[in-house]
Image: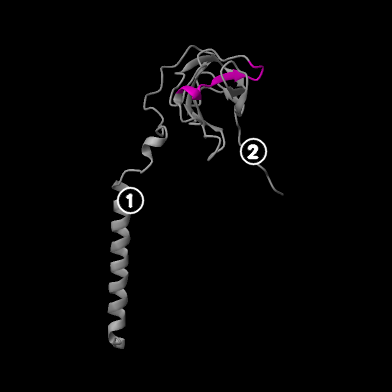
Amino acid sequence: MRAKPSQLPFLRRSLFITLFAALVALAGISLISPQANAGDTIPGGTVPPGTLPPPGPSGQGQVNVIHLAPFDPVIANTAVDICTEAGTPVTGATNLHYLEQSGYLLLPQGNYDWKVMTPGCSSLIVNLEPFTLFDQAVLSVLIIGDGVNQPFDSVLIVQDRGISLKKYFPLIFNQP
């Protein structure tokens, strides 16, 4: 039995609505059903909530290092140290495990070039991008990646840029 030409728009609309409803239902089921392998891996992390710390003394800023790199299924095996370029551990940022953070470290303003390394600053995991810590600045460094599905990397979050002595003046060009 063939549909009459006058019924085609109605049939198309009905088919579209039926398919749309089925997709919405399937999406809803997949969002509420638990993951089949949820117990096989360590849980994903989120950045802990909190407020900015009070300003430190003049000439200093604060840095918080948050370890979000699940590179081993056993949390005890995810320990890292934050080390200087020379291989010296950064006080307060050692033996960090997955989902742990250093807390806000009070540091003198200046330029920093750190590395994420295995405990004892023995093997490089990721070389962090150098950053400048200004007077009264508040920064967070996130260590991310698992080394397999996502390469190790870092994200620098500027929560308060602090006081910079650099002044930027607009340049005005006068064209003849």
Q: Is residue 134 above or below residue 22?
A: above
Left or right: 116 in relation to 39:
right
Closest to the observer: 137 or 120?
A: 120
- Residue 24 position within the rendered picture, expressed as x and y whole percent measured from the top left: 30, 58
Of the two numbered discs 1 and 2 on the same chain, state the one appearing first in sequence.
Answer: 1
Q: Report the mark closest to the observer, 1 or 2.
A: 1
Does residue 128 belong to the magenta stretch? no
In the picture, residue 85 is in which quadrant?
A: top right
- Contact, CB < 8 Å: mark 1 with mark 2? no
Numbered-mark total: 2
Label disc, if present, on residue 171 of the rendered structure: 2
- Residue 119 position within the rendered picture, expressed as x and y whole percent measured from the top left: 56, 18
Q: Is residue 124 above or below residue 87?
A: below
Please state which amino acid type lies under the numbered disc 2: Leu
Q: Is residue 34 above or below residue 85?
A: below
Closest to the observer: 62 or 135?
A: 62
Please state which amino acid type lies under the numbered disc 1: Ser
- Crowding at dot 1, Cα within 10 Å, few <14 / some 14-19 / many 20+, comes out as few
- Crowding at dot 2, Cα within 10 Å, few <14 / some 14-19 / many 20+, comes out as few
Residue wearing tag 1: 30
Q: Quadrant of the N terminus?
A: bottom left
Judged from the image, the secondary structure of the residue bearing numbered disc 2 is loop
- Residue 47 position within the rendered picture, expressed as x and y whole percent measured from the top left: 41, 30
In the picture, residue 3 is in which quadrant?
A: bottom left
Judged from the image, the secondary structure of the residue bearing numbered disc 1 is helix
Cα distance in 3D space between marks 1 and 2: 55 Å
The magenta segment:
76-87
Look at the image and name its color scheme. one colour
Label disc, if present, on residue 83 of the rendered structure: none
Q: Which residue reaches farthest right?
A: 176
Left or right: 38 in relation to 17:
right
